[in-house]
Amino acid sequence: TLSELEASPSMELVAEIENEALGLSEDVLEAARKARGTERTLLSGINVRVLAALGEIPLIRNSVARYLASVTPTERERNMAALRAAIRVIREDLTPLPVEGGE
């Protein structure tokens, strides 16, 4: 969906991304409540990253609004660059970290 947002920015896609992230956070929290030990720690770490991504949603929303309000090609290009940077931050938040001693 982030790729879709980059290809065709819209407030509807921002809302969809936000809803998906909220749902994921709820699912991860529920699983973490039932988990123990290392699994619980890993799930808690995942939730921290999802919450960080959710924290970037206002920036994404603002970037999309500026892009959609762009009048000139130069303005549109500049605002698209800002949107891509915001999308990159969310992707980094959601990219899994390598697990030490992984299988």
Image (tube, rainbow, N blue to C red):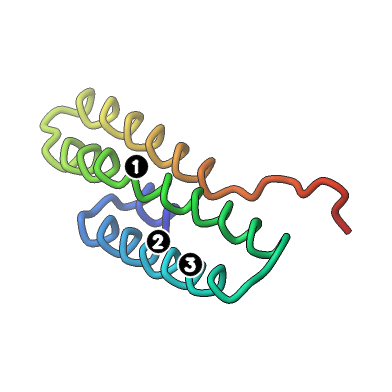
- The residue singled out by tag 3 in the image is 29
* Number of marks present in the image shown: 3
Residue nearer the viewer, 70 or 62: 62
Q: Amino acid at mark 1?
A: Glu
Q: Is residue 75 above or below residue 86?
A: above
Q: Mark 1: which secondary structure?
A: loop
Q: CA distance from mark 3 to mark 2?
A: 12 Å
Q: Which residue is mark 2?
A: 21
Quarter that holds the C terminus:
bottom right
Q: Position of residue 102 (x, y in %)?
A: 85, 54
The kind of residue on which mark 3 rests is: Leu
Q: Quadrant of residue 67?
A: top left
Give residue 35's quadrant in the image. bottom right
Relative placement, left or right, of 66 versus 54 is left
Q: Amino acid at mark 2?
A: Ala
Helix, strand or loop at label 3? It is helix
> Residue at left 34%, top 44%?
55
Label 1: which residue? 56
Residue 36 rendering spot, x and y as whole percentages: 67, 69
Name the residue: 14% across, 34% down. Answer: 70
Quadrant housing residue 64: top left
Given this view, does label 1 or label 3 mark the residue nearer the observer? 3
